[in-house]
Amino acid sequence: MVVGFQLDDATALNLLWSEFNPRCVPPWNPESERKDFERKVTQARGTPGKKPSGWLLDEFGLRSGEDAMANIVAGNRHAEALLARFKGAKPGEYVPIDDSDSLGRAPFPVNLFPARFADYCMESAESMTVCPSFFGLPMLAVAGVAMGNAWRLSLKKGFVVPPILWVALVARSGGNKTAPIKQVKAPLDNMVQIANLEDAMWNPQGIIDVGDATTEMTIQLLQENERGLLMFRDELAGWAGAFDAYKRAGAGGDQQKWIEFWGAGPYRMHRKTGNERVFIPAAAVTILGGMQPKILQQCFDPGKFDSGLVPRILVTCPPPRRGRWTEAAVSDRATEVWADALMWLRTRPFVGLDTRIGCDKGQYIPRVLEFDPLAKDIYIDFHNRMEKVVDEASNDYVRAFAAKAQQNAGRMCLIHRGLWLAEHPDAALDGPVTVDSITAGTEWMEWCLAEQMRVYGFAAEQYAHEQANALADLIRSKWNGKATMRDISRSNNRKFKNNDDAVRAVQPLIAFGLARWLEQNKEIELI
């Protein structure tokens, strides 16, 4: 009652005495044993449990979507605590925080993988002394790459999702972000022998890992690879940061192109110069890489939400761990199991070729899987819970993350089904997607949603601090610590188009205690 329903002490004690105590044999004595009950309530609040605070409210639909999301986010206190730990630690310094620490971060649910792949994930994480999420999320992304455009999942008639994920591992320099990704994706470098292909005509192969490629080169490579691509970057800051530079160069539209690549749908480009026309039936690009917390805050500023770019990126940012020597290593058998699974997924053919499509080569037809009835009910329940969050949230960030969670859960479900089929190669490829897969997809997504909110929470707050400090420096140097909204607006009329823009810009200074109003919405003074 105390944890599951988030009851206050008085309500919990009253219910214990009125509803629970009469069933006890013999009943507790309210006079002499009340202290024991009060002690148990206090202990319940302080004892870590496997389920989050308020879980019964969510299970019985007694809490609004925004309240539930607020619990997932874990509040500003957690974000501040996380920032303080990162900020206070020197490079290479050990920060003693467990994976399931006071910040409310749940362990990554490795057990949702089919058994052999769960073993590979845990062995790999132990061998590199990293959080299992540093292997789990890349495994999902890379398995999705191997499945590629040959697979789709129908969420309902006319709406299918691809096995495409965007994943960023967030850690400080030296946090071992790159090695797990390289290990997980290494089997993609193995050549596919023609002899291993069933229906070779319907099973085109090509480059998968494009590495550091420009947007224009990525488009060219997509024309040559019908199954889709993987872009791996040691530091995704270069990928995200290039958007603004590209826009300044006069071309523009980079973010929108990449959002289309996440959707894995048709891509069309027409240019007047040279009468160039490009049509890609299924432009699918998985993105996988690392990100430093400070760079995350610089690259993924709140403005990126306008395009929908950030909510599509699944992140994991475990607390820093002590680097230690270990003799643990991934067994040859586990490595072989993972490599064989990726090769098996890569060599499953499309189901046909539609030559009527408007490009020279036609369009390869994917294998479209369907839910079984029980699995469909679970997905509908998850979808409706996310819709409730979207409808009730007053925060645009919460709304954006929850909206993308609906699709990403379906994508993860499809990837789980692919891995399950790789473990059971004699099963029917076109068989229905079962409860195990949709349960894995939705639970993985719920974990990712909590992590997105937590990680973006500290990045957005740090970004706001930096913007506020920059404006305070301007007011200090240009107007000797006092400025009117007219002064601020005139200082940069492109950024602050009017008085209202200036007021919005100075609000964080007030909130962070850097300034105070001399005259409301007209003039401020630095403190």
Image (cartoon, rainbow, N blue to C red):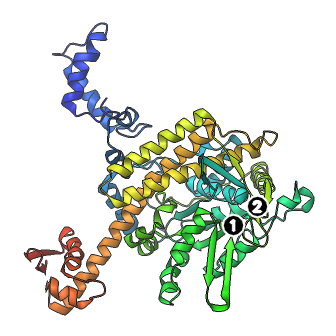
Q: Residues within 10 Å of mark 2 (few under 14, many from 20)?
A: many
Question: Is residue 439 rendered to the left or right of residue 195?
Answer: left
Q: Residues within 10 Å of mark 1 (few under 14, many from 20)?
A: many
Query: Residue sitting at 49 percent across and 85 percent down?
Result: 247
Q: Amino acid at mark 2?
A: Tyr
Query: Residue sitting at 68 percent across and 39 percent down?
Result: 432
Q: Are marks 1 and 2 in contact (CB under 8 Å)?
A: yes
- Residue 399, picture quadrant: bottom left
> What x and y, as percent, mark residue 45?
30, 36
Q: Can you name the residue that lies furthest to the left here?
A: 519
Query: Residue sitting at 61 percent across and 72 percent down?
Result: 233
Instruction: Check the picture and name the quadrant holding the C terminus.
Output: bottom left
Instruction: From this view, report whether residue 256 is shown above or below residue 316.
Output: below
Q: Amino acid at mark 1?
A: Pro
Question: Is residue 68 rendered to the left or right of residue 190?
Answer: left
Q: Can you name the residue that lies furthest to the right here?
A: 195
Q: CA distance from mark 1 to mark 2?
A: 8 Å
**Nearer to the camera, 158 or 481:** 158
Q: Secondary structure at mark 1?
A: loop
Q: Secondary structure at mark 2?
A: strand
- Residue 278, picture quadrant: bottom right
> What x and y, as percent, mark residue 210?
69, 73
Instruction: From this view, report whether residue 516 is shown above or below residue 123.
Output: below
Residue named by callout 1: 281
Q: Can you name the residue that lies furthest to the top here?
A: 26
Instruction: From this view, report whether residue 418 is shown above or below residue 171.
Output: above
First in sequence: mark 1 or mark 2?
1
Residue named by callout 2: 364
Instruction: Check the picture and name the quadrant holding the N terminus.
Output: top left
Question: Is residue 509 rendered to the left or right of residue 416?
Answer: left
Residue 448 seen in the current view: no
Q: Which mark is residue 132?
A: none
